Structure formats: structure tokens, C-alpha cells
Image: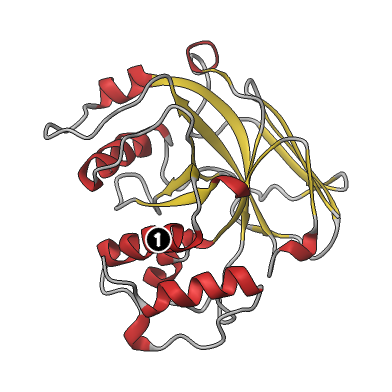
Amino acid sequence: MTESTLAAQLVQARRQRTLIEELESADIPADANAAYVIQQEVLSLTGARIGAWKVGARAPGAQANTAPVDAELVHTSPVRIAHAAFFRVLIEMEIAFRFSYALPPRAEAYSRSEVFAALGGMAVALEVVDSRFAQWPNLAPLAQLADSQNNGALIVGKMEPYEVIAPGLDFLSPQLELSVDGVSIVPPSAGNPAGDPRELLVWFVNHCSAQGHTVQPFWTVTTGSYTGARRIEGPGVVSGRIDRIGDIELILE
């Protein structure tokens, strides 16, 4: 693995809390695989441990993408975090999953039934969307993918048994609430653009397998926003709920 200029810039931005003001065209990853290499370089250079992953797609069946989340950026609800800890704060409400056991790399692809059978828990999650680039969101998608797909932090609610909660749950349009200081920020039409987020997990497990990663049962895998990214300009209490799964709270100080 050859250290890239972009990986070094991302590490510096994280350590020094300074934005990358300009992105040279030569530093934009050539393709998704190059972006995934940069993600791993940043983890290595910062000594980070993976605590979670985010995975998403723009439409059902569309090409998915994923990014690891540093374990230090994964928080259990309720949690207090300084608004100033981020360059910007946008909130997404999601459903997160954990597996019951490890899924190691193998030559044969994991089937949908195998992946679903391995699911052990699910929870409400809030992702704080952030970016290390000053020009975000007017930025090459592959650069955003290299930058942990714009992850700032992940807040996870109580993990509930998948086999208890999943039956009867409307994964396409679950009943949900999301508010800031009691004022709803749920858009008129809420829904995950990828459709049923569990389908993303099949791609994710096989992506990890192809990359040589064992999917770990302690990883939280969050699967895309049902509310879009809602910008929060200052301190406040972000509260959410997805029916049948549970509640979540983030206090931005």
C-alpha cells in the first residue's frame, strides 16, 4: 500500500482540526477501489480501530458504497457532544445492525439467506454527517468516499434482538420521529433511497469478504438515511424514534 497525498491531507485535517481548502484533481481517487485504499490508509496512519461501518446506495439495486467508522466516533445514546467538535453538523436517522457471529472472507459469495440468518441485533442510529473539505458538498463523490463517506460520528440506540423486531417491521417506510428541541425535522416524504436496507448488508458482507475483512459481531453497520441530511446550525437536543425499534438522543452542546 502506497501512502497517498490525499490520505496524508485527511489525517492532517483530523489531527489539526483544519479543513482541506483545495483539492487537486490529481488527488481525487481514480475509482471506488482507490478510495477504499485511502480509507484504510487513514485508519492505519491514525492508529484507529474500526467500530462501525456505514453503507448506502442511491436507489434499490444501485451500486452501494461503504466506509469504516473509527471506534472513537461511535457513541451510545444518550450522548453529549460539542457542536464545535465538527466542521458542520448534518443529522441523518438510520437503522443499524449487528451480526451474531463473525463472517470471514471466503471464495464463495455469501447468499442473502446466509447474511439475513447471521443478523443478531438492530437499533436506531443517528449519523453526524461532516466533511474535512472546505468545498463540500461541491466535491467529487470519490473524494467524499475516501473521506469516510462524510462521516463525523455515529450515535447508536439500544440494540434490540433482530428476530424479535424485524418480523412485521415496515423497512421501507417505518413510522419515525426526528426533532431538534421538540421541532420536527422529518421531511414530507421519508424513506431510505436504497429501499429495504437489509439488502445493503448482503453487498456489504461480500464487499468485506473480497477485501479480506472478517465481518465482526462487534461492528455496528448503519444503512442509510430515512430522513435525508438535516443541517443543525448550533447547540440543541436531537431526539428520534423509529417505531418498534426504539429511541435515540444526541445533545449538541
- Is 8 above or below relative to 38? below
Which residue in the rendered view is the most extreme toward the top? 164
Q: Residue furthest left?
A: 107
In this picture, residue 229 sits left or right of residue 237: left
Q: Position of residue 70 (x, y in %)?
A: 53, 50
Specify few, some or many for label 1: CA neighbours under 10 Å numbering under 14, 14-19, or 20 or more. Answer: many
- Residue 196: x and y, percent? 42, 34
The answer to whether residue 189 is seen in the rendering is: no
**Residue drawn at (27%, 20%) of the image:** 113
In which image quadrant can residue 152 be found?
Answer: bottom right
> On the picture, is 228 further left or further right than 194?
right
Q: Quadrant of residue 207?
A: top left
Q: Quadrant of the N terminus?
A: bottom left
Query: Looking at the rendering, in which quadrant would you find the C terminus?
Result: bottom right
- Which image quadrant for residue 208? top left
Q: Is residue 31 visible?
A: yes
What colouring method underlies this structural image?
secondary structure
What residue do we see at 41% from left, 21% from top?
119
> Residue at left 36%, top 65%?
38
Vertical order, 159 against 73 (above or below): above
Three-letter code, disc 1: Gln
Which secondary structure, mark 1?
Answer: helix
Residue named by callout 1:
39
